[in-house]
Image: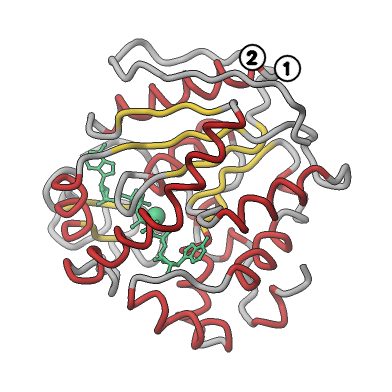
């Protein structure tokens, strides 16, 4: 069990700006430096960023279950910037029974992607919140080339802060590991802390360490839906990874290692990429 405390206010559904309805969410830089870094995942002392470190926009890319949400929560705690998870936003809408939630529910349970237009508008709206001004972590977005192009265009507009290019970090995990991570995942419905019954279990089975809520399992965390999600990833999201790799400001980390080792590798990659893009 890890000792990382949850930050409910920072990564709950509400924290990602979802007031709920389709109407509410449908309101609505990159400089050319290319610094490609492939990051070593050996465990080394915690990366030191310095007090004035500005993380800027960070993309966490990777297949279902690689650890995007887990690592985003750690970055939220470290840098005090918000996690923007399109999956969490959509699940929040499903939980509230909004019009968007009703549309998204069936698509998500089939392992396919929600329409680009809906997701783009959701993110556009969220990026206008002032808590993004020091940076933010996009978790699970963009995941089509159209979404990536939309994001690139959007944040090139000077009204979006910080005026820094995105850095993209791709987490890579073997297929067998992913299946176990998906089927073993449990989440606290209150603080959103992510557990795993095999690798990151709560102290008491099915109970959150932090607020004692009963843990829940995502309805798409079954083997058949996971297989579909992987096919969707290979067909539609792998080209997004290639897009950011080609742009530079990209690092790949080995997500097969312990949660803490992956965290160190990501923080180091982030510092290296930001240094290279100053
Ligand atoms: P989303 O919620 O984004 O799901 P996903 O991308 O499939 O990723 P997951 O959340 O399943 O995994 P994760 O990488 O966050 O892993 P986690 O940290 O939880 O999207 C769901 C659906 O919404 C999509 O299928 C689609 O329908 C829709 N959607 C979302 N965004 C969209 C978009 N942009 N466009 C269109 N549709 C969209 O970790 C997994 C488990 O592993 C946990 O149990 C954790 O404890 C464990 N774990 C993590 N790291 C480690 C480690 N290092 N060692 C051991 N265990 C670990
Ligand atoms: Mg996730």
Q: Quadrant of the N terminus?
A: top left
Q: Which residue is mark 2?
A: 275
Q: Which residue is located at x 61 percent, y 57 percent?
A: 147
Q: Residue 215 in the image: x percent, y percent?
A: 25, 65
Q: Residue 266 in the image: x percent, y percent?
A: 43, 27
**Depth order, front residue of 23/109:** 109
Quarter of image, res 236? bottom left
Q: Residues within 10 Å of mark 1 (few under 14, many from 20)?
A: few
Q: Is residue 116 above or below residue 261?
A: below
Q: Quadrant of the C terminus?
A: top right
Q: Residues within 10 Å of mark 2 (few under 14, many from 20)?
A: few
Quarter of image, res 205? bottom left
**Depth order, front residue of 172/161:** 172
Q: Which residue is mark 1?
A: 278
Image color mode: secondary structure
Q: Which residue is located at x 39 percent, y 45 percent?
A: 62
Q: Is residue 43 above or below residue 165?
A: above
Relative to residue 30, is residue 102 drawn left or right?
left
Relative to residue 81, is residue 231 drawn left or right?
left
């Amino acid at each position: 069990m890890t000792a990382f405390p949850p930050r409910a206010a920072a990564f709950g559904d509400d924290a990602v700006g979802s007031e709920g309805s389709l109407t509410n969410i449908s309101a609505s830089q990159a400089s050319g430096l290319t610094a490609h870094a492939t990051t070593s995942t050996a465990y080394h002392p915690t990366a030191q960023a310095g007090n004035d470190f500005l993380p800027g926009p960070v993309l966490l890319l990777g297949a279902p279950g690689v650890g995007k949400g887990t690592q985003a929560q750690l970055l939220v705690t470290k840098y005090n910037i918000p996690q923007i998870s399109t999956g969490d936003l959509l699940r929040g809408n499903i939980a509230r029974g909004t019009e968007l939630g009703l549309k998204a529910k069936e698509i998500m349970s089939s392992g396919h992607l929600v329409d680009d237009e809906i997701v783009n508008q959701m993110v556009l709206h969220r990026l206008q919140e002032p808590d993004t001004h020091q940076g933010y972590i996009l978790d699970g977005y963009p995941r089509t080339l159209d979404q990536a192009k939309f994001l690139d265009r959007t944040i090139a507009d000077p009204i979006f802060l910080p005026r820094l290019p995105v850095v993209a970090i791709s987490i890579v995990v073997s297929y067998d590991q992913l299946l176990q991570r998906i089927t073993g995942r449990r989440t606290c419905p209150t603080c959103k802390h992510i557990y795993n019954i095999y690798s990151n279990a709560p102290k008491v089975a099915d109970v959150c360490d932090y607020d004692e809520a009963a843990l829940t399992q995502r309805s798409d965390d079954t083997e058949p839906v996971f297989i579909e999600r992987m096919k969707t990833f290979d067909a539609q999201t792998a080209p997004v990874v290639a897009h950011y790799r080609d742009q530079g400001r990209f690092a790949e980390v080995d997500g097969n290692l312990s949660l803490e080792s992956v965290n160190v590798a990501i923080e180091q990659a982030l510092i290296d990429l930001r240094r290279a893009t100053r």
